[in-house]
């Protein structure tokens, strides 16, 4: 039998409190409390709260205040800018432009193939389809389309980085 805490112990040993807090808050599926994030990051709640406040002040994470609760979640714009900076360091401008053109062709291909302007519309169409295998295929295409659309925004940020340089 394997030790299920071995990976967690290694994570704690090889990362700082701040790194673990950032890893947790950037991967939560919905905004969470500092106590939830502290528990997941294996840090004291006060440590998590203080670091989350710092991250929120710099817009690295979202702060949502509702019903006297402060909830923290990933800031997708910030994450996209970070990913764009990574892309800009991996690709030259021409490579980024080619990548952008390929993604735009993929999206235009789906629009033409299905006669639908967006992945959201494709999901709605999938719901109205009687055949299960066709509905699954359409939802898979919609999921891929959404991913390409998001990645396209990241590539566009990277291209803008080159334009400003």
Image (cartoon, rainbow, N blue to C red):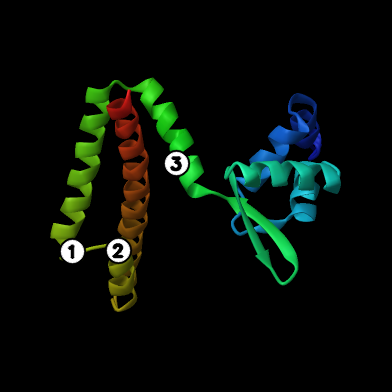
Q: Which residue is mark 2?
A: 138
Question: Who's the residue at 75% across and 68% down the image?
Answer: 68
How many other residues sit within 10 Å of disc 1, few (<14), some (14-19) or many (≥20)? few
Q: Quadrant of the N terminus?
A: top right
Residue 80 badge: 3
Q: Residues within 10 Å of mark 2 (few under 14, many from 20)?
A: many
Left/right of residue 84 with respect to residue 119 in the rendered view: right
The reply to whether discs 1 and 2 touch (Cβ–Cβ < 8 Å) is yes
Q: CA distance from mark 2 to mark 3?
A: 26 Å
Check disc 3 and report its element: helix, strand or loop. helix
Residue nearer the viewer, 134 or 16: 16
Mark 3 nearby-residue class (10 Å; few <14, some 14–19, many ≥20): some
CA distance for labels 1 and 3: 28 Å
Decide which of 100, 49 is in the foreground and name it: 49
- Against 24, is 66 above or below? below
Residue 63 sits in which quadrant? Answer: bottom right
Q: Which residue is mark 1?
A: 114
Residue placed most toward the observer, 73 or 55: 55
Q: Quadrant of the C terminus?
A: top left
User: Which quarter of the picture shows residue 52?
Assistant: top right
């Amino acid at each position: 039998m394997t030790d299920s805490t071995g990976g967690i112990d290694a994570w704690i040993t090889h990362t700082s409190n701040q790194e673990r807090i950032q890893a947790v808050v950037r991967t939560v599926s919905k905004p969470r409390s500092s106590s939830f994030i502290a528990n997941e990051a294996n840090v004291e709640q006060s440590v998590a709260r203080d670091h989350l406040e710092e991250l929120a002040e710099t817009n690295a994470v979202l702060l949502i205040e509702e019903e006297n609760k402060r909830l923290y979640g990933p800031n997708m714009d910030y994450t996209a800018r970070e990913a764009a900076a990574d892309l800009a360091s991996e690709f030259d401008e021409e490579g980024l432009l080619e990548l952008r053109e390929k993604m735009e062709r993929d999206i235009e291909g789906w629009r033409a193939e299905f006669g639908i302007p967006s992945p959201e519309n494709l999901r709605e169409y999938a719901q109205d389809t009687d055949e299960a295998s066709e509905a699954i295929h359409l939802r898979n295409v919609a999921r891929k389309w959404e991913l390409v659309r998001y990645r396209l925004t990241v590539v566009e940020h990277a291209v803008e980085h080159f334009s400003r340089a």
